[in-house]
Image: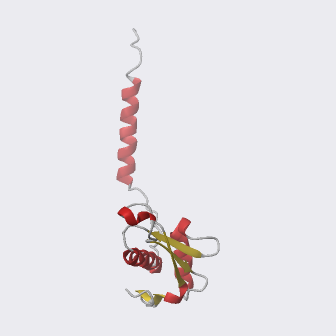
Amino acid sequence: MNPDDDIPVAEGVIIRAADLDESFVRASGPGGQNVNKVATAVHLRYDTTRAELPERVLVRLLAIAGSRATKDGVIIIEASKFRTQERNRVDARERLAALVAKAAEPPPPPRRKTRPTKGSVERRLKSKAGRSTVKKMRGRVQDD
């Protein structure tokens, strides 16, 4: 995956390389002697205000991104899973592509309300009555 290539995500949805901004920082975690010297972690910024995404995808993307999106509409993905800069860069781009692909999917249809069947209502009421009589029988025994 070349850093200068656009990323095709879905039908008619492309992440342009020009909209991406990468910066490299020192990562915690695995790295041995290099951990304090080499900047391997990637901060990938995707500016949605410049992105040429359909409006419905853009709205869903910002909703799905949650805390990864800033108030300015920039999505920030941090990748520091691997020990090399290149693998972290690929990982960040793949995670962004997965996020945009999920936003490009149409939302599920709203749930249709259903009513319980007459038989299930009758069975429920009968069992409630049965439990009621069992609990009434737990009281004190009275002599007649």
Residue drawn at 54 percent across, 74 percent down: 75
| Vertical position of residue 6 compared to residue 42: above or below | below
Percent x, y of residue 12: 46, 91
**Residue 16 appearing in the image:** no
Residue 11 horizontal/vertical position (percent): 42, 89
Q: Is residue 17 above or below residue 139?
A: below
Figure quadrant of the C terminus: top left
Q: Residue furthest top?
A: 143
Name the residue: 35% across, 45% down. 123
Q: Residue at x 57, y 81 (%)?
A: 48
| Observer-nearest of 65 and 138 | 65
Which is more toward the observer, 13 or 40?
40
Point 40% across, 60% down: residue: 29
Q: Quadrant of the N terminus?
A: bottom left
Rendered location of residue 23, percent (x, y) = 52, 76
User: Residue 49, located in which quarter of the rendered image?
Assistant: bottom right
Counting the numbered discs, the total is 0
